[in-house]
């Protein structure tokens, strides 16, 4: 059971990580590169507990986008490949810095150029994923940096 839920916009970041091919399976778990590829995070599953080194999971205690991406790969959460393709190449680090961690504003900028219908589908799918999170029999903890 999750103690804290992530901001909805972390779903979009997870989609981008998958669409960009920044998630790799390793012997111990997974490696996920940041959007600017300046950092690599690890996610290590141990049963239904996922240890992760990304800042959101490590410091805030909610599943960050690397964990969400892994759960999508593992089929714990749905992955909407066609919607994720619209967020391929989004520079999330740059947008989040620009908007001073206002994730909603960063996402709105990431949606620039997308058809309003597509953005609506993305928002609906992300909200559906967020509604699933409290029902999951999984938890997160700090990984070893």
Image: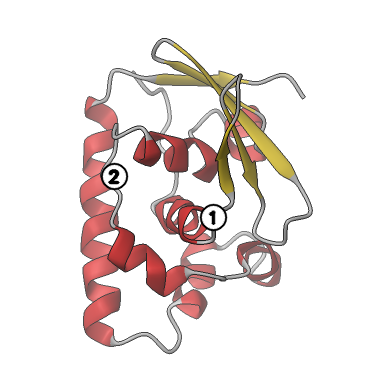
- Where is residue 71? Give x, y as percent: 38, 34
Q: State the CA–CA distance, disc 2 to disc 1.
A: 23 Å
Residue at the spot of label 2: 130
Quarter of the figure that contains the C terminus: top right
Quarter of the figure that contains the N terminus: top left
The answer to whether 15 is drawn above or below residue 119 in the figure is above
- Residue at image position (41%, 23%) is 3
- Where is residue 73? Give x, y as percent: 38, 39
**Whether label 2 touches label 1, CB < 8 Å:** no
- Write down the quadrant of residue 101 in the picture: bottom right
The answer to whether 123 is drawn above or below residue 33 in the figure is below
Residue lying farthest to the front in this orientation: 27
Badge nearest the viewer, 2 or 1: 1
- Residue at image position (22%, 37%) is 132
Q: Which mark is residue 21?
A: 1
The answer to whether 43 is drawn above or below residue 127 in the figure is above
Near mark 2 (Cα within 10 A), the count class, few <14, some 14-19 or many ≥20, is: some
Sequence order check, earlier mark of 2 and 1: 1
Q: Which mark is residue 109?
A: none
Which color mode does the image show?
A: secondary structure
- Residue at image position (40%, 52%) is 11
- Where is residue 139? Give x, y as percent: 42, 19
Q: Which of 23 and 69 is in front in this view?
A: 23
- Where is residue 7? Give x, y as percent: 44, 49
- Residue at image position (49%, 69%) is 88
The secondary structure type at the circle numbered 2 is helix
The secondary structure type at the circle numbered 1 is loop
- Write down the quadrant of residue 100 in the picture: bottom right
């Amino acid at each position: 059971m999750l103690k804290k839920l992530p901001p909805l916009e972390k779903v979009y970041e997870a989609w981008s990580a998958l669409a960009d091919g920044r998630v790799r399976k390793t012997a111990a778990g997974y490696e996920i590169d940041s959007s600017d590829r300046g950092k690599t995070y690890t996610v290590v599953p141990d049963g239904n507990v996922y240890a992760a080194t990304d800042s959101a999971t490590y410091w805030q205690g909610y599943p960050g986008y690397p964990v969400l991406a892994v759960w999508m790969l593992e089929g714990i959460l749905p992955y909407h490949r066609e919607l994720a393709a619209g967020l391929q190449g989004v520079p999330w680090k740059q947008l989040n810095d620009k908007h001073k961690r206002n994730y909603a504003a960063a996402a709105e900028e990431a949606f620039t150029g997308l058809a309003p219908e597509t953005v609506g589908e993305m928002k609906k799918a992300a909200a559906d994923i967020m509604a699933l999170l409290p029902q999951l029999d999984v938890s997160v903890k700090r990984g070893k940096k």
